[in-house]
Amino acid sequence: MHEYSIVQSLLDACEENAKANDATKVTKVVVKIGVMSGVEPELLKTAFDTFKEQTVCDGAEFIMNIQPIKIKCNSCLSESTLAKLEYCCPHCQSVELDILDGEEMYLMQLELE
C-alpha cells in the first residue's frame, strides 16, 4: 500500500511547516485528493491515524476533500466535471480531452499551534 509512504511524506511536510513557523503542534491537516490520483481515501485516513502518534500531528483532525475529474474538450472547447470515469466529453462525445484537475493529491491547509 503506497498510502503509508504518502502519509510518511505528509507527516514530514507537516513537521517541516511546524518548524518553519515555530509551532509545536498541528491541529488540522486538509488534503485534496483527485479521483484519478490512485490514492484510496479510506486507506490514507487509516494510515494517517496510525502514524500521526508521537509526531506534531498527534491529535490532529484530518480532512480529505475529494476532487472530481475536470476536463476541457479539445473539440468543442467546453469544460466539464465528469461524474464517472468515462473519458468522453458529455457535450459532443469527443475523446480528445485535457484533464484540468482530479489527478493529484495536495496538502491544502495546516492549522498550527
Image: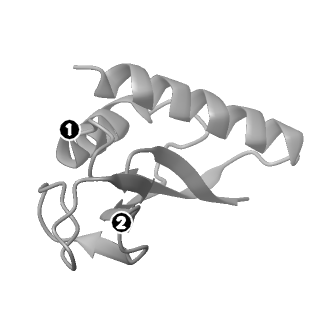
Specify the quadrant that holds the C terminus: bottom right
52 or 3: nearer the eye? 3
Q: How many marks?
A: 2
Is 99 in front, or is 20?
A: 99
Q: Between marks 1 and 2, how big is the CA–CA gap?
A: 38 Å
Q: Residue at x 62, y 51 (%)?
A: 26
Name the quadrant of the N terminus.
top left
Badge number at residue 43: 1
* Foreground label between 1 and 2: 2
Q: Is label 2 in a helix, a strand or a loop?
A: loop
Q: Residues within 10 Å of mark 2 (few under 14, many from 20)?
A: some
Q: Residue at x 30, y 73 (%)?
A: 81
Mark 2 or mark 1, which is nearer the start of the sequence?
1
Query: Looking at the image, which residue sits at the far front?
Result: 75
**Where is 49 relative to 101, above or below?**
above
Q: Position of residue 112 (x, y in %)?
A: 70, 58
Q: How is the image coloured?
A: one colour
Name which residue lies at 68% across and 34% down. Answer: 15
Kind of residue indicated by mark 2: Ser
Which residue matches tag 2?
75
Give the residue at x 11% y 56%: 86
Front-most of residues 51 and 5:
5
